[in-house]
Image: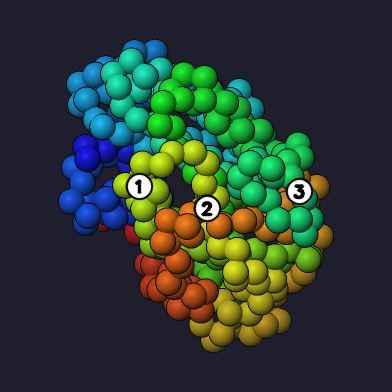
Amino acid sequence: MKILVTGGDGFLGRHLCKELAAHKHTVVPIDRTLNPEHDLRLVGVADAIVRGHRPDLVVHLAAKVGRLFGEDDPMETVIDNVGMTALVAQACQAYGARLAYASTSEIYGDNGDAVCDEQDGPFTLPHNLYGISKGHGEHVCEHYAPDGLTIFRFSMPYGPGLPAGRGRAAIINMLHQALHMKPIPVHKGAERSWCWVGDTVRAARVALEDEVGGVFNVGRDDAAVPMLDVAKIACDLTDAPYSLIEEVEAPGNQTVVKRLATDRIRALGWEPMVELDDGMGRTLDWVRSLTADGEPVPV
């Protein structure tokens, strides 16, 4: 297939483009960092790109991502996650491209120990604008480009490629903090099932190639780990003392526990392959390349 990937220079985008190309798909990454003229928030840009490339499939990853970043500028978050999505979906429908939309497990809200599946949830109001906006993005895709639509509700992907710092992935931050002997704050009671990014993008590829469409939780349901233990693994990998770990109360807009059903993606033959200790060890190689401030070293 010829596949256009928006946000193709982002964390998931880079990994997904490599995964798709390795399986003989023609991949066209679209990202403002690659071409400043590819600002999909501007009217006409998505239309021109999809019309020009005529892909079989558009994977729309470009978004304002994360609980904290989503609250920094509410207007920008809504524009990025709803308005931009509407323009991309319209272009897909206009030129006959199938659409796959990157949503998030945050749309389920906080349901404690309840397992959330794609159809029945349970759904509660998300704690944050990021989750709310991505949920609206799903509805926009269903409105403008329903034919063969695939929706991925990604949950807790991790791996190399992200900076450390405010609003970044907890595993990256914990490894960076441990490596530089800084305090490692951990939310009390927090628990996650982390999914190695290679497993995440492989799941997406399997669903895209199967062409069944619909909604998929993409993450793990079999590896729930207290975040306190994740912090300890970070310390073990970097020979840092556990005394760096500081348990703190979770903020009010934080979903403390996530439990997702993954029967649907597993029914396509997908199984995760990389366990947390191994994945964090691989991620540490990337974190060692970051500056003390958490940024990638300029090339």
Camera-side residue of 197 and 268: 268
Q: Is residue 143 left or right of residue 228?
A: left
Camera-side residue of 11 and 35: 11
Question: What's the distance in space between the residues labelled 3 and 2, CA to CA?
Answer: 21 Å
Q: Answer with mark 1 or mark 2, whichever residue precedes in sequence.
A: 1
Secondary structure state at the residue bearing disc 3: loop
Q: Is residue 182 left or right of residue 271?
A: right
Q: Is residue 44 left or right of residue 256?
A: left
Residue type of the residue flagged with mark 3: Asp
Whether residue 294 can be seen here? no
Q: Are marks 3 and 2 in contact (CB under 8 Å)?
A: no
Residue 30 picture quarter: top left
Q: Residues within 10 Å of mark 3 (few under 14, many from 20)?
A: many
Q: Position of residue 290 (x, y in %)?
A: 41, 63
Residue type of the residue flagged with mark 1: Asp
Question: What's the distance in space between the residues labelled 1 and 3, CA to CA?
Answer: 31 Å
Residue 110 numbered tag: 3
Please tell me which residue is depicted at 64% across the width and 55% down the height of the picture. 260
Secondary structure state at the residue bearing disc 1: helix
Q: Position of residue 103 (x, y in %)?
A: 53, 40
Please tell me which residue is depicted at 35% across the width and 47% down the height of the picture. 210
Residue beneath disc 2? 264
- Quadrant containing the N terminus is top left
Q: Position of residue 163 (x, y in %)?
A: 46, 56
